[in-house]
Each structure stands twice: as structure tokens, then as C-alpha cells.
Amino acid sequence: MTENTNSTTEEKPVRRPIDTAIRQQRMNAWQPILDPTYVIGALIVFGAIFVATGVTIQNQNSHLVELRQVYDEYNNGDSLCYISKANEGRVCNIEFKVPTKLEPPIMVHYEICNFYQNHRKYVKSRDDLQLRGAGNSSQGQGNCDPLRKLGNVTLNPCGLIANTFFNDIIQLSSFTDSAGRVVVMNESGIAWQSDVEHKFKQPLGFVSEQCTSCDDADCNCDSGAWSCTTPFQDNTTSPPTCTKYFYPDQYPDQGNTQYLFQTYPKIINPIEGVTNQHFIVWMRTAALPNFRKLYGWINTPIEANTTLRFLIEANWEVQSFKGTKALIVSTNGPFGGKNPFLGRIFWIVGIIFLVVAVLFGIKHTFRPRKLGDPRYLRAHVKQE
């Protein structure tokens, strides 16, 4: 009986890595040896760099000026602008005596303490499609809960961030300095340019026109598609100018929607809507419960002993979360505003490096260790 055997052809491997140094792990490698002399020298160099950087930052920081005034505080009825409920509209005045000459740009911030914009649910409570003008589509609005609707009325924009917008009104009483320059506070250019250009748009279908004069013949209020509003003060110009705006009678689906200019009529006008830069600044949430946000800036030098007067209308309450509100006027440096901590941490780290270098140097001087000394090896002999 003959046994038939089937011969198989050996196939050449097709997934074998290419025979190169990098594929076959034959690359030349360099492994630095931490020689004590090099380590001590590196610690001294880095320590000197850190100390010099810290001293430089602190020196520049010492020349910055920061003026701060708390104007509303939880459970303190003696605060300048104390309010117990939202939209109370209490008006107060804050004065700052300038101790030394302030060079532009001079920043005006509001500071809020104990308000957790970094809470996970708060940060997620927004609809970015809606903010970019997509309208009241259901896509993305699930993140807006619990502030997506008020009864049967849809909020646009929806969400916790948009509907807790800081709506205190801060105005600088403009004046003319000794050099004849008009000192005003600019409220444009305070938001990130990328946010202004890409993340916030009026709803699709919204159209507006601006007339150069309230008496312009081209501004026809009789047309059924357009309606006149009261003259709007444009604060982006210096000095502010008064112009007439026109916009359609209806925002898209306005009968069933509450828009931002209806929620905050004192701050937001119908022409800007969500493109208002104060609103855009607020929508970029803070990482810590105590934070500052830019409200405006002054581009004119202010001489020493000048009195800056701010008029504040308080509408944003802090009693519900036991917080405080403050107004801050400050100058800027290469590393931002006044911050003593930044320079301090640099030179502290630098001093630690130098101290460790000295300790290593003393040890290496009196008890040096020769590299590769077999006395420092532990031999493990297997006992048989």
C-alpha cells in the first residue's frame, strides 16, 4: 500500500520588517553618564538663570501699579454698591487716586471671588452651534440643560454661562488731561480675536444697516421690513458717536425665542447680540473660583495725583454664592499684570538648585566617588 504525501511549498514571510537600522533596532544610542562634576555645574548654571529671571520679573513687577476697590461684598450692606437681588440697578461712584504716572495700556478689570466658572456642568452648559448663528436647532442644545427654555420660550443663547452673564455697567467719567488729551475707556478689543471672528455670530437671517446720520434720507422707517430704534451710542469711537441703526422687525423665530438683547437690554443692543465683546469675554470661562476679566482699557497716559472716577450700575448679585466684586485699574508689563508670585517662584527654585549644587560639591570634595568603582557593586553569588 502506497502512502501519498502532500508536499507543501514554504512561503516567504511577507510581513518581515525591512532590514534597516531603525526597523531592526540597530540605531546608535547615546546614554549620558551623570558625572558629579557635570551635575554640579548644570545645577549652578540653571540656578543662576532662575534666580536672575526671578529678580528681573520682580523688578519689573515692582514698577507696575494696581489700584483695587471692592464695591460689593456678601453680607456687607456697607459696600459701595451692595445689592441683595439681581438687576437692582444701584448706582455708585468709585474713585482712584493715581499715586504715580500710569503708562498705557492701562487695564480695567472686574474681579469676582468665589464663583466657580470651572465647574464641569457649568463649563459644558452652552451650545456652540447656536452661538455661531445656527439658530434653535436641537443639535447641541442638550448641553444647555437646565437653562435651555423658559416655559415654552427657547433661550438664545441657552445654557448656564450665557444666562449668568456679568451685567454690571462700568463707565469712566472721561476728562481732559493737562496736555489736552481726552481720557476715555475703550471697550473694544478686549476679547480674543479668534473668538470674535469665528465663534460668535448673529443668527442666520439677521440683517442690519447703519446710517451715517439720523436724518439720512436712505434710512426709510416706513418699510415694513425695517424698524427704527433709538439712537445708539457707539463707544468704539473716540469720542463716542451717536448713530441710528436699522434692523428687521423680527429676529428669526422671535415669537418663540428670547434673545440675548432681550435678556440683558442694558448691556446688549440688538445690532451686536452675541458679538458683544463683554459677552464674549464672559463666555471664556475662568479656571479658578477667584478670577479677573477685562472690561476696558485706557490708551492715554495718566499723570500722578489724577483722580479716576468710575460710575457703576450694579445688577449682578453676589449674595447667592457668598462672593465679592471688585474694580481694578492696573498697568501691564512684559509678563502681564502685577503678580509678585511669578518672580518669587523663579528665584526660590533657583536658590534650591544652588543649595543642592553646594551640598553635592561638598560631598564630592570630601568623599568623592570614582565612576565604575567595583566597591559600589553588590555581587550576588549563587550558593550551590
Image: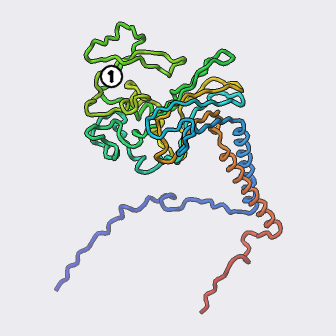
Q: Which quadrant of the figure has residue 162?
A: top left
Q: Secondary structure at mark 1?
A: loop
Residue at label 1? Answer: 207
Q: In the image, is residue 24 above or below residue 310?
A: below
Farthest-out residue, right: 366
**Picture coordinates of residue 288, whole percent (x, y):** 53, 48
**Picture coordinates of residue 114, whole percent (x, y):** 52, 48
Q: Indicate the colouring scheme.
A: rainbow
Q: Which residue is pictured at 58% across the width and 23% down the height?
A: 173
Whether residue 345 is visible to the viewer of this picture, yes or no, is yes
Q: In the image, is residue 270 above or below residue 51?
A: above
User: 383 or 167: nearer the eye?
Assistant: 167
Q: In the image, is residue 339 above or below residue 100?
A: below
Q: Amino acid at mark 1?
A: Val
Whether residue 287 is visible to the viewer of this picture, yes or no, is no
Q: Is residue 176 left or right of residue 87?
A: right
Q: Is residue 313 left or right of residue 206?
A: right
Q: In the image, is residue 129 above or below residue 382?
A: above
User: 196 or 118: nearer the eye?
Assistant: 118
**Picture coordinates of residue 377, whole percent (x, y):** 69, 77
Quarter of the image that includes the C terminus = bottom right
| Dot 1 crowding, Cα within 10 Å, few <14, some 14–19, many 20+ | few
**Picture coordinates of residue 146, whole percent (x, y):** 34, 47
In this figure, what is the number of numbered marks? Answer: 1
Farthest-out residue, bottom: 384
Quarter of the image that includes the N terminus = bottom left
Q: Which residue is pictured at 68% across the width and 16% down the height?
A: 179
Q: Which quadrant of the figure has residue 57?
A: top right
Q: Which residue is pictured at 43% across the width and 31% down the height?
A: 197
